[in-house]
Image (cartoon, grey):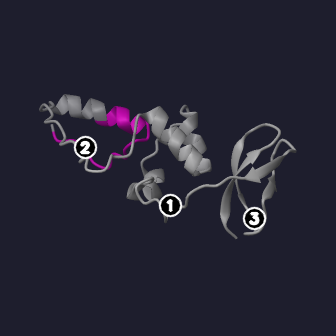
């Protein structure tokens, strides 16, 4: 069955539901009824969502103090993707726009590298398997 977006007539929440192709309504968690919304498919609007949207779960922070990330990981809907992008300051490239070249970084001392890796390991952003050479 296809996935559709619905808007509740009681609480106005937009939610996704899996219903038959001829169904026009779906129950909302508040007890109200959601009406099917028109949502262009990703197949017909390739520029609306970039190719990395399918693998965005791999780059979303697993930090439990970031509720927008946790919500996206639990429910990777289009609505949650847009919320995540807004909070993280991420946007799609405009047609003809290219990614900016990374700025050159300064050289870090071995001590600075150790501190950064230790902090990232504590935040579970990286797994350190070997020691950094001194």
Q: Which mark is residue 42?
A: 1
Other residues around mark 2 within 10 Å, as few (<14) / some (14–19) / many (≥20)? few
**Residue 66 spot, x, y in % from top left:** 54, 33
Q: Residue at x 57, y 44 (%)?
A: 80
Query: Quick one: label 1 or label 3, which is nearer the N terminus?
Result: 3
Quadrant location of the C terminus? top left
Residue labelled with disc 3: 19
Point out the frontmost of discs 1 and 2.
Answer: 1
Q: Residue at x 20, y 29 (%)?
A: 111
**Residue 96 spot, x, y in % from top left:** 25, 50
Instruction: Judge by depth and name the residue closer to the eye, 108 or 26.
Output: 26
- Can you name the residue that lies furthest to the front here? 38
Determine whether, in the image, residue 49 is placed left or right of residue 72: left
C-alpha gap between disc 3 and disc 2: 53 Å
Which portion, as a residue range, is magenta? Answer: 117-133
Q: Secondary structure at mark 3?
A: loop
**Residue 30 spot, x, y in % from top left:** 84, 41
Q: Is residue 130 magenta?
A: yes
**Residue 82 spot, x, y in % from top left:** 51, 43
> Up-down: is 71 above or below 6?
above
Query: Quick one: label 3 or label 2, which is nearer the N terminus?
Result: 3
């Amino acid at each position: 069955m296809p996935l559709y977006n619905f808007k509740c007539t009681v609480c106005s929440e937009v939610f996704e539901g899996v219903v038959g192709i001829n169904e026009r309504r779906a129950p909302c968690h508040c007890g109200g009824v959601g009406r099917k919304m028109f949502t262009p498919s990703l197949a017909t609007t390739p520029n609306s969502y970039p190719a990395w949207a399918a693998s965005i779960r791999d780059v979303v922070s697993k930090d439990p103090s970031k509720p927008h990330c946790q919500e996206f990981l639990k429910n990777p809907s289009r609505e949650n993707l847009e919320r995540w992008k807004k909070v993280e300051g991420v946007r799609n490239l405009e047609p003809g726009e290219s990614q900016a070249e990374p700025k050159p970084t300064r050289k870090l001392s071995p001590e600075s590298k150790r501190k950064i890796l230790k902090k990232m390991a504590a935040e579970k952003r990286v797994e350190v398997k070997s020691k950094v050479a001194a």
